[in-house]
Image (cartoon, helix red, strand yellow):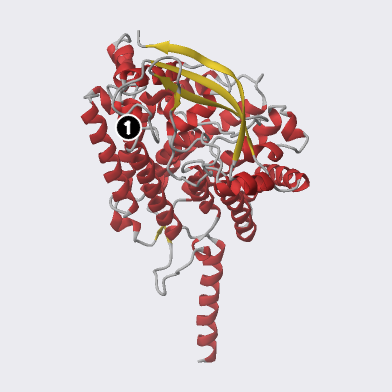
Amino acid sequence: MHGRTHHTTFRASLGHRLAHRWSDQRRLRDWYLRGLGGTYFIAFTSLARQLEGLYGKRGILPIREVLTAAKALPPKQRLASVPTVFWLDASDAALVRACRAGQLSSLLLSLGIAPRWTAAASWLLYLSFVSTGRDFLSFQWDALLLENGLHAMVIAPRSRRSARTAERPPWAATQLMRWLAFRLQFESGYSKLASGDRTWRRGTACCYHFETQPLPTRLGWHAHQLPRWVQRLATLGTLAVELGAPFLAFMPRRVRRAGFWLLSGLQAVIAATGNYAFFNLLTVLDNVWLLDDEALPWQPSHRPPARRAPARQWLATSLATVPLAVLAAAMLVARFRPEHRLPSSVNRALAALAPLRSINAYGLFAVMTTHRPEIVIEGSDDGVIWHAYEFRDKPGDLKRPPRLIAPHQPRLDWQMWFAALGPPRGWFVRVLARLLEGSPAVQGLLAATPFADHPPTYVRALLYEYRMTDRETRRRTGAWWQRELIGIYVPPCAAG
């Protein structure tokens, strides 16, 4: 009897050791897919609030124009070059319907309903906007969302029922997601040094970042007041985490868990001090793949032991992940060695997949801006008295405090930051033209217009240098910003 008991105990212990040796990501995969669905929902909902003003018939960059230009291509190349459902209908009503359909599919994904199909639908609908959205949908988090969406179609279970089974995600799926988390954050660090930017190399980037980033938060204003040595330490810490911690993604379990907290902690600080839409949320979701199920809270009291996925599913997942991983690795190699020529087959594959925008290179703020020019648009009825248009979220009124608006992204406000760094862009000229027309859709993107009942006769744009005030000035005047006029960005113009 004693021997039998000892044998049973040994088997149980062996099973426990094997379960510990082979990581289990069943619940982790479920958390990730639900989180991805939630992120898609945020992205579609944020876009819906701005859709007509950005892309409608009387918007800044109508989607219909992209399709009209693409019709010059041979019929077989049109869809390959501009993959979008709007080939069927690009009316304003169709744009709204597509956004609502995206909200629905992402909501179903977040509920775990037919995850593979709802992930595919969300990806296709978001790609439809990105492939026709030009400047206002060209941000790295848009590309990252599409890349995650493509990966989700590979790793998602076939149905809600299969998501609740004991099948462990194939090993190739787990490694693909860790590879994405690695690339995203390591490339962000590498690009900062590879750019040759002085502020990153001298450790002073964060002395400027909190003030000059596109849409600071109130906490970002306070971070700008920190002693310079703290900001220099933050710069070095950012580089250390982005260049070192991603390698922990491929280490043993406890080391990977430390990597998760380091990388996600950095994202939390970035999110608290600046508005980067859903980028930080999506990055943390990718970092979740550094964990295993036992690291997640609310562990179920009973669940069946994990087992390997069926051979057919394991093989299909592996065959899908290998080309994705190889092509992404080729892009990374190209960044390290620009002079190195990739095999022609790899270049052809990357070129063919480029319109899908789902295999990408990353690197935010590779070059740090050290000053903050801001554009102020003004209108006038007589060319003598001018009134400023007020944007919702970018700096304007000196006494309006910076605020936290993420994960929503006011895309016009964001692009105004880029516009101020160079000469007027085509879309900015469109903004002025729409204001002269009195377009309600474009006016709806702004916080206030001084010409509510009629369009102005003239508009112009002035360029200011904005700087954050110090604590003493803030207490004395109530101003968060101070500014100095640089000059005229666009001279007065009238409707043609």
Q: Is residue 63 above or below residue 68?
A: below
Nearer the observer, 21 or 35: 35
Residue at figure coordinates x 76%, y 38% from the top left = 203
Q: Is residue 359 visible?
A: no
Residue at figure coordinates x 32%, y 54% from the top left = 112
Q: Position of residue 94 (x, y in %)?
A: 22, 30
Nearer the observer, 48 or 378: 378
Q: Residues within 10 Å of mark 1 (few under 14, many from 20)?
A: many
Q: Is residue 259 above or below residue 176?
A: below
Q: Position of residue 441 (x, y in %)?
A: 30, 28
Nearer the observer, 381 or 69: 381
Q: Is residue 433 above or below residue 8?
A: above
Question: Where is mark 1, residue-wise?
Answer: 51
Residue at figure coordinates x 32%, y 56% from the top left = 162
Q: Is residue 56 above or below residue 298?
A: above
Q: Is residue 236 visible?
A: yes
Specify the quadrant of the image occupied by residue 330: top right
Q: Is residue 490 left or right of residue 227?
A: left
Q: Amino acid at mark 1?
A: Leu
In the rendered picture of this protein, how many numbered marks are placed on residues? 1
Tell me the quadrant of the picture where the C terminus can be found.
top left
Q: Position of residue 84 (x, y in %)?
A: 31, 26
Specify the quadrant of the image occupied by residue 214: top right
Q: Secondary structure at mark 1?
A: helix
Q: Position of residue 295 (x, y in %)?
A: 53, 64
